[in-house]
Image (cartoon, grey):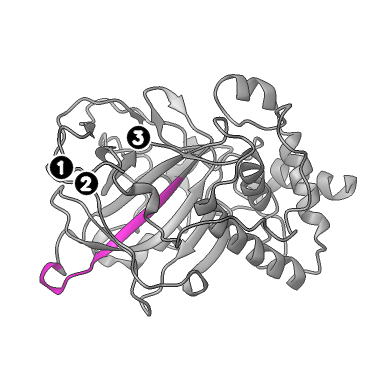
Amino acid sequence: MFALTWLVCLCYLSRSAALEVFSYDNTGNWKNAKNVDDNFYSKWDKLGARRNRCGDADGKKSPIDLRKTATCRSDHEMLIGRGKCSLSQVDWKIQPWGLEGHYPRTCKRPTVDLSDSFHMRHASLVRVKVPSEHTMEGKRFDGEVQVSHMDNALAANRSNRLEHVENISVFLDARSSPKKDNAWLEKMLVRWETEAKKQNARCGVTSATFEADLHFVGKRKNPISQRDQGLLPFATPDAPPPTNSTAPARRLRTKAWYLHSPWRNVFYYGYKGGLTQPPCTPNTFWYVSDEPQKISARQLDRVYALLAGYLDDDCELGTYADRDGSVARPVQNSRGAKVFHCDERDYLNHSPK
C-alpha cells in the first residue's frame, strides 16, 4: 500500500509536464491550454466552444461567489420532467477533472423548464466537482453537482438559444450529517465505482488501489486547517475510517431515483457566466440551488478517491486535481455580474415540499 500511495502522490507532483490540456495546480495558465476543442461542449457548433476564452476580460466568468445584486427574473420554479432513461443507459465516466454521466439521445432524457426565457431542455451531462466551485455568500461547500442542458425538448422551440448552455447546480454538504449517506448521490457513486473497477481490471490493478487512494485522501496537505475554514471534512474524529470502496454499497431505502430530484421545489441563484474549465466559453446561464444536499463524509472521501485513482487509456495515473485533490476552478471576479435570487415571493406556482 505504501508503494501505491507513493505512486499516487508522485502523479500529483509530476503530472503537469504530461498534461497537454490543463490542470488545477496552475489555473492561471489555462489561457494557454491546448486542444481545447476536444471537449464535451464542442459537439454543439452554435455554442462556439472551440476557441480558448479563459484569458478574456469580458466579465462573464465562472464560478463566482453568489450574492444577490439583482431582482429575480423567474416567475415559476424549475419544472421537472423525469424522463425514462435508466441508470444503466447513462455513460458514466471518471474524468481527470471530475466525475461525469453522459445522457444518450437513444432514451427519453430528463428535462427541466426554467422561466428565464429558456424552454424545456434535455439533460445532457451531469458532473461532480470537489470542493464546490461556486460559493454562497462567502461559504464554500464540500462538493457541487452540475447538470448541463444543451438542446430543447420541444420541436416548436428547437432553435431557441442554442448559443447558450443552461446549467443547474446543487452544493454537497458533508458536515451537517457526516455519517448519513445520501441516497441520490449513492446511486451515481456506485456506477462510477463500477467503471473504476472495470478500468483497474483492464490495467491489471487490484482493488487495493481504492484503499491506497482513500489513504491518500486522508493524508492530503493541511486537511485540518482546510476543514476549519469550512472546507473538506476529512479525518474528522466521528467519521468512519476509510475502507475499500469496492465493497458492495449499503442498500438505501429510497423512492424512485431521478436526476433532478434535488432541484424540485427549491429556490436558487442565477447569473450569466461561463464554463468553469477550458475553453471557459462565456455563454453559460447558471442556476444554483440555495439548499445543499447533505452527504456523508464517507461518500465525499469516495469521490476524492475515484479522482485520485483516475487511470487514463494508457493505464497511467492522470488526474488533473491539485495536491489537495481539488478539481474546482477558483472563484472568479464577479464585478458587474447581475446575480438574482428567487424565493417563494417570486414563484406564482410555489408549492411547499
Q: Amino acid at mark 1?
A: Ser
From the viewer's perspective, is residue 226 above or below residue 1?
above
> Magenta region, mostly helix, strand or loop?
strand
- Disc 2 packing (10 Å; few <14; some 14–19; many ≥20): many
Question: Residue at horizontal 70%, vertical 53%?
Answer: 309
Q: Amino acid at mark 2?
A: Glu
Q: Position of residue 268 (x, y in %)?
A: 28, 38
Q: Position of residue 260 (x, y in %)?
A: 37, 55
The question of residue 172 being in magenta is answered with no
Closer to us: 21 or 185: 185
From the viewer's perspective, is residue 342 above or below residue 19?
above
Report the quarter where the C terminus lies. top left
Q: Which residue is mark 1?
A: 74
Q: Which residues are magenta?
A: 145-157
- Identify the mark nearer the N-term, 2 or 3: 2
Q: Which residue is mark 2?
A: 77
Mark 2 vs mark 1, foreground winner is 2
Q: Which residue is mark 3?
A: 290
Question: Residue at horizontal 63%, vertical 40%?
Answer: 325
Q: Quadrant of residue 67?
A: top left
The question of residue 151 being in magenta is answered with yes
* Mark 2–mark 1 distance (CA, rounded to whole Å): 8 Å
| Callout 1 secondary element | loop
Q: Position of residue 162 (x, y in %)?
A: 20, 61
Q: In the visual, does 340 lie left or right of 170? A: left
Q: In the visual, does 270 lie left or right of 198? A: left
* Mark 2–mark 3 distance (CA, rounded to whole Å): 13 Å
| Callout 2 secondary element | loop
Q: Are marks 2 and 1 in contact (CB under 8 Å)?
A: yes
Q: Amino acid at mark 3?
A: Asp
